[in-house]
C-alpha cells in the first residue's frame, strides 16, 4: 500500500497549475494522478445508473406504501360507494375513488414510514447516527508521497488552491491511484470547504 495525499480542485486547469508547482518541487508525472469525481449517486455502478441497489433511508418504505394503499383505498371506496348509492351512480365512481385512495395512501404510507426514522432521537449521551461524509464532485489531484513528505505535500496542495485535502492508503501503479473508490468516505486531514 502506498501513501496518497489528494485534494479537490474546481477545474482541470487549476489542477494542471497545481501539478506544475508539484513538478517544480521535484515530483514526477508518475507521482501525480488527476481525474474527475462525479457527484454522489452518479458513479454508474449499475446498468440503470446509481451507486447503490437501494437508498438506505428508504428502508421499509414499501411496507408503508402497501399499508397506506390498502387502508386509504378501502376508505375512499367505502365513501364513494355510499355517495354512489345515494345518487344511483355508476360502479365506476367507486372503482375510481378506490384507485385514487390507493394512490394517495401509497404515497402517504411510504412517506410516514420513511420519515418516522428521521424523527427517532438518540438517547442522551449516545452519538447521533448519520451518513458517512460524502466526497464532493470536482477534479481530484492525487499525489503519491513518501511518509516523510506528507506534510509538505499537503502544504503544496493547499497553496496551489486545493480543498478537501485527504489522506489515503491505496494501490499506486503506473502513475495512477488504481483502487480509488468514490463511494469510500474520504479521510480528510483538513476541514472540508464548501464549493463556490
Image (spheres, rainbow, N blue to C red):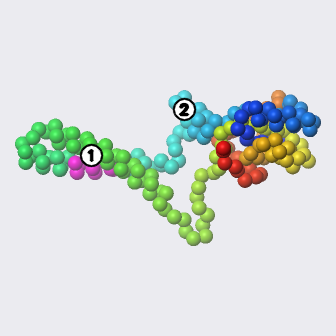
Tell me if 74 is positioned left or right of 195 in this view.
left
Furthest toward the right, the residue is 26
Q: Position of residue 179 (x, y in %)?
A: 74, 36
Quadrant position of the C terminus in the picture: top right
Q: Nearer the viewer, residue 150 or 54?
A: 150
Q: Position of residue 33 (x, y in %)?
A: 79, 33
Quadrant position of the N terminus in the picture: top right
Tell me if 15 is positioned left or right of 81 in this view.
right
Q: Nearer the viewer, residue 192 or 64?
A: 192
Residue under the image location 7 percent in, 45 percent down: 87
Q: Main secondary structure of the magenta part?
A: helix
Quarter location, residue 180: top right
Task: Please check the rendered image and state whether residue 74 is part of the magenta-colored stretch, yes or no.
Answer: yes
Task: Please check the rendered image and state whether residue 158 is part of the magenta-colored stretch, yes or no.
Answer: no
Q: Which mark is residue 49?
A: 2
Label 2 vs label 1: CA separation? 32 Å
Q: Which mark is residue 101?
A: 1
In primary-sequence order, the first of circles 2 and 1 is 2
- Mark 1 residue element: helix
Is 13 located above or below residue 121 in the figure? above
- Residue 33 visible at all: no
- Residue 163 visible at all: yes
Q: Position of residue 181 (x, y in %)?
A: 69, 38
Q: Position of residue 138 (x, y in %)?
A: 68, 38
- Mark 2 residue element: loop
The magenta stretch spans which residues? Answer: 66-76
Amino acid at each position: 500500500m502506498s501513501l496518497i495525499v489528494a485534494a479537490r480542485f474546481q477545474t482541470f486547469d487549476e489542477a494542471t497549475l497545481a501539478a506544475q508547482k508539484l513538478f517544480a518541487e521535484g515530483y514526477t508525472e508518475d507521482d501525480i494522478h488527476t481525474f474527475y469525481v462525479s457527484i454522489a449517486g452518479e458513479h454508474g455502478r449499475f446498468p440503470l445508473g446509481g451507486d447503490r441497489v437501494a437508498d438506505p433511508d428508504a428502508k421499509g418504505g414499501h411496507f408503508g406504501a402497501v399499508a397506506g394503499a390498502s387502508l386509504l383505498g378501502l376508505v375512499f371506496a367505502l365513501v364513494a360507494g355510499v355517495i354512489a348509492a345515494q345518487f344511483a351512480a355508476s360502479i365506476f365512481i367507486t372503482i375510481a375513488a378506490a384507485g385514487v385512495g390507493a394512490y394517495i395512501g401509497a404515497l402517504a404510507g411510504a412517506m410516514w414510514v420513511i420519515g418516522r426514522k428521521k424523527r427517532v432521537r438518540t438517547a442522551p449521551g449516545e452519538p447521533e447516527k448519520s451518513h458517512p461524509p460524502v466526497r464532493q464532485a470536482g477534479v481530484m489531484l492525487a499525489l503519491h508521497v513518501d511518509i516523510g513528505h506528507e506534510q509538505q505535500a499537503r502544504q503544496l496542495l493547499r497553496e496551489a488552491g486545493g480543498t478537501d485535502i485527504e489522506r489515503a492508503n491505496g494501490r499506486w501503479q503506473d502513475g495512477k491511484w488504481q483502487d480509488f473508490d468514490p463511494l469510500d468516505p474520504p479521510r480528510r486531514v483538513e476541514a472540508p470547504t464548501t464549493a463556490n
